Image: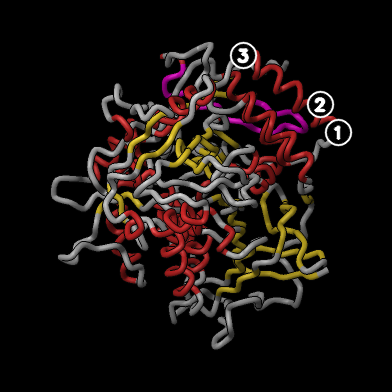
């Protein structure tokens, strides 16, 4: 068994985890761990850009209003305002570290338009490879930080607790058990849950294991019913399915049916309606036996603007200048997750959660396009600022007691604290573990969620789905996939209305009874206990927000 000690252990190799690791390493020793390299993260695969209001005709206020409208009354307006106001500064920061944003002939940043945005404000890098370009820029800068070590071959399976506080992680690396103690905090940036559905744009590792682990350890979860389905993934065999960025429709592509008729012609914004609206229209057409295609023949210089998509289409024998190509919805982004403030602070002391694994109230019931990478960046900066403000500094400006590992390669080495060899900040009193799910079990969960917790839900299918996951839970009580599927379906059943990405065919209208109300979950022993809270109640507070929570029926099928 290997034991290591550092100030922060960051779990995840995407944009949130990598940015936070680098910023924290400016004043502390950080170990960043992940099961796969950054190339396996959702951030790396992100085609869409980053929303930031910088034109004279635009403003952070308009960006915030668009975000609030998409969130359908369940956004934390304070957090949304912070996100929109900080966006231009974060874009300037990215440019300062070498991110090369796409520019026009005059040298101005070329701003794109996406669904539910009232202004062109989407910053792209490398056309449709924004996530990869931004993550490469951050990684390059982070690689020069001597206080940061990176492992890309550790599977985190457990959280260590002492006195009710998270003090480290455990897992497997190269066939050996590894324990890493964190003197200050464990930071989970482990991504979303798309791979719990049979059709998804997410990479293979996006099964929500970090969310399940944090929840089972005692952290609050929220908004578990809100799963965003991207309306346009290439409708060919494979999992994950290849995403066709919303920017393609922003550039002029149109959705048509098998007869060539426009699918969204009767809607005010037509093809640029919010994602949930477009996804349901396509889903309904497919249910009736029709097909839906994306017609990009009017998009000039397609391959120049969307090189990644053009290459994938070419591999399938599709030429977008000539051929409309089949699309269908797929699970894409999770608005739910571990309840956190913008710094990542959760209800469980010692545990911070960043990025898609967190539920900050920024996205509400439906994420506005190109706000996800922005949230990753903002949370990483807010997390570092939170911890920097708490540090006690010596005369030279460094943390007292810390010995920096100068001139030591950051990759594949563990930072060591200047205490007794192998000593941690206190032996763990408890270890909460999850067991990774095998493919047969994942496939069962996928089919249940697609039928019961998919694009359109109803009481009968939700009840049936909950019975099926209850049977799986009896066989595999430690399954992270079953834990998350249970929360998703129970939350969807409790919310007897339609709002944002959550649509109930048996309750198709938005109900005022659910205005400003989010469902918050806590684990009590083996029971999942739901309560409702105000969407604007500050998350991440150690008192469990008891004053703002009221009991909600917890009846199970």
- Where disc 1 sits, the SS reads helix
The disc label shown at residue 471, or none: 2
Numbered circles on residues, count: 3
Residue 154 shows in this picture: yes
| Mark toward the start of the polypeptide (2 vs 3) | 3
- Callout 3: 10 Å neighbours few (<14), some, many (20+)? some
**C-beta proximity under 8 Å, tags 3 and 1:** no
Counting from the top left corner in percent of width and height, residue 453 is at 61, 27
Give the structural element (helix, strand or loop) at label 3. helix
Tell me which residue sits at (63%, 75%) in the image.
Answer: 415
Look at the image and give the residue range highlighted in magenta.
514-529
Q: Is residue 178 above or below residue 205?
A: below
The percent position of residue 106, horizontal first and vertical second, equals 15, 65
> Can you give x and y, in whole percent of width and height, for residue 279 in the image?
45, 30
Magenta span dominant secondary structure: strand
Tag 1 residue = 475
- Please give the name of the residue rendered at 68% of the width and 17% of the height, measured from the top-left corner: 463
Residue tagged by mark 3?
459
Q: Secondary structure at mark 2?
A: helix
């Amino acid at each position: 068994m290997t034991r290591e000690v550092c100030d922060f252990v960051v779990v995840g190799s995407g944009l949130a985890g990598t940015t936070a690791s680098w910023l924290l390493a400016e004043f502390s020793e950080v170990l960043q761990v992940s099961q796969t390299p950054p190339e396996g993260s959702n951030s790396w695969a992100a085609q869409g850009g980053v929303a930031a209001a910088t034109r004279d005709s635009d403003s952070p206020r308009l960006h915030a209003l668009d975000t609030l409208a998409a969130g359908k009354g369940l956004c934390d307006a304070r957090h949304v305002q912070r996100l929109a106001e900080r966006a231009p500064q974060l874009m300037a920061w990215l440019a300062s570290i070498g991110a090369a944003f796409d520019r026009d002939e005059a040298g101005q940043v070329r701003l794109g338009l996406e669904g539910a945005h009232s202004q062109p404000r989407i910053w792209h890098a490398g056309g449709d490879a924004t996530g990869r370009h931004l993550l490469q820029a951050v990684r390059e800068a982070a690689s020069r930080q001597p206080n940061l070590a990176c492992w890309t071959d550790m599977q985190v399976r457990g959280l260590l607790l002492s006195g009710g506080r998270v003090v480290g992680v455990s897992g497997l690396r190269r066939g050996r058990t590894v324990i890493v103690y964190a003197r200050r905090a464990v930071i989970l940036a482990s991504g979303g849950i798309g791979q719990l559905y049979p059709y998804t744009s997410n990479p293979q590792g996006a099964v929500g294991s970090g969310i399940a682990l944090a929840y089972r350890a005692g952290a609050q979860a929220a908004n578990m019913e809100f799963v965003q389905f991207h309306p346009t993934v290439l409708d060919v065999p494979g999992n994950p399915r290849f995403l066709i960025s919303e920017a393609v429709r922003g550039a002029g592509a149109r959705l048509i049916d098998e007869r060539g008729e426009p699918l969204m012609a009767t809607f005010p914004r037509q093809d640029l309606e919010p994602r949930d609206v477009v996804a349901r229209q396509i889903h309904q057409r497919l249910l009736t036996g029709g097909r839906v295609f994306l017609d990009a023949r009017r998009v000039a210089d397609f391959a120049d603007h969307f090189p990644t998509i053009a290459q994938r289409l070419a591999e399938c024998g599709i030429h977008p200048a000539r051929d409309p190509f089949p699309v269908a919805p797929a699970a894409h982004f999770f608005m739910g997750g571990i309840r956190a403030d913008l710094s990542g602070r959760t209800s469980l002391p010692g545990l911070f959660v960043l990025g898609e694994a967190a539920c900050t109230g920024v996205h509400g019931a439906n994420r506005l396009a190109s706000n996800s990478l922005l949230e990753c960046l903002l949370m990483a900066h807010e997390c570092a600022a939170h911890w920097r403000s708490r540090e006690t500094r010596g005369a030279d400006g460094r943390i007292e007691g810390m010995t920096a590992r100068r001139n030591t390669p950051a990759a594949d080495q563990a930072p060591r604290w200047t205490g007794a060899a192998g000593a941690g900040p206190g032996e763990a009193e408890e270890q909460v573990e999850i067991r990774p799910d095998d493919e047969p079990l994942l496939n069962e969960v996928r089919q249940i969620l697609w039928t019961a917790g998919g694009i359109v839900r109803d009481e009968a299918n939700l009840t049936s789905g909950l019975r099926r996951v209850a049977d799986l839970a009896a066989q595999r009580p430690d399954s992270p996939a079953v834990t998350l599927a249970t929360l998703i379906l129970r939350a969807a059943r409790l919310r007897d209305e339609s709002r944002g990405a959550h649509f109930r065919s048996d309750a198709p209208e938005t109900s005022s009874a659910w205005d400003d109300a989010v469902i918050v979950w806590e684990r009590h022993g083996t029971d999942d206990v739901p309560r409702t809270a105000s969407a604007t109640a500050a998350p991440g507070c150690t008192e469990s927000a008891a004053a703002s929570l009221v009991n909600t029926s917890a009846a199970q099928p």
